[in-house]
Image: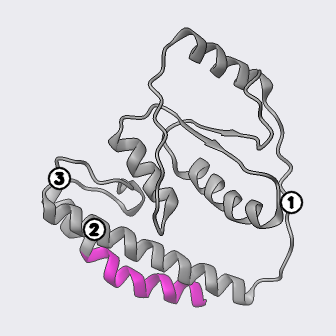
Amino acid sequence: EEIDVIHANWQEQLEPLRTKLNSLLKQQWREWKIPRIAEKNWPAEAKEIHSQWWEHRRDRQREIDASIARKADMETLYDQPYEDNKRVREIAARLKKSTPRVESLLLFANDLVDALLKTAHEHGATIIVIGLSRPGVIERLIEGNIARSLLNTSRLPVLALPPNWDGTI
């Protein structure tokens, strides 16, 4: 299969980087255990190798996705989100009891999800709150990918607020 060939070709580049990263950090990480964000106390060489590894990993995934897109039957899928009012009320109750420190940041990045996760880690965030804009087609495409990627990759809880949210619960 084409995907197996793509994977094998990228492994030739990824595996030496993983081995070197493990050696520098005295770890035994398998591919799926390598953290997405480098720790502040890592040596500069380890941070650079980590960055290269993730760049190659993203490139490999893009190539695999492109292969799948070329060969796969097309089907339009529609999300059927549901509101979990109980969970929202629980979060709201916790927030009302505490006095959270809130920061708003404006980020410019090619990979916004990685930038959000890295910034949240650097600032010691305990939750990520994102606001969704009006539900237009283009906005849903762009925002949906960012929100979905953030929900799938974040170790922190992510609260996505609907576009017409007025602040009441």
The residue singled out by tag 3 in the image is 42
Q: Going by the image, does 33 lie left or right of 137?
A: left
- Give, as a three-letter code, the residue at label 2: Arg
Q: Going by the image, does 43 lie left or right of 104?
A: left
The residue singled out by tag 1 in the image is 78
At x 44%, y 25%, the residue is 101
Binning the other alpha carbons within 10 Å of mark 2 as few (below 14), some (14 to 19) or many (20 upward) gives: many
| First in sequence: mark 2 vs mark 1 | 2
Q: Is residue 62 above or below residue 97?
A: below
Could you give the CA–CA distance between mark 2 and mark 1, rounded to whole angstroms?
37 Å
The residue singled out by tag 2 in the image is 18
Residue 27, x across and y down, in percent: 21, 53
Residue 67, x across and y down, in percent: 63, 87
Between disc 3 and disc 2, the foreground one is 3
The stretch of residues the image draws in magenta is 1-16
Q: Going by the image, does 105 lie left or right of 158?
A: left
Q: Going by the image, does 105 lie left or right of 38?
A: right
At x 60%, y 48%, the residue is 151
Residue 160, x across and y down, in percent: 67, 41
Residue 121, x across and y down, in percent: 37, 43
| First in sequence: mark 3 vs mark 2 | 2
Could you give the CA–CA distance between mark 3 and mark 2, rounded to whole angstroms?
15 Å
**Is 10 included in the stretch rendered in magenta?**
yes
| First in sequence: mark 3 vs mark 1 | 3
Q: Main secondary structure of the magenta part?
A: helix
**Helix or strand or loop: what does disc 1 sit on?**
loop
Q: Quadrant of the N terminus?
A: bottom right
**Helix or strand or loop: what does disc 2 sit on?**
helix
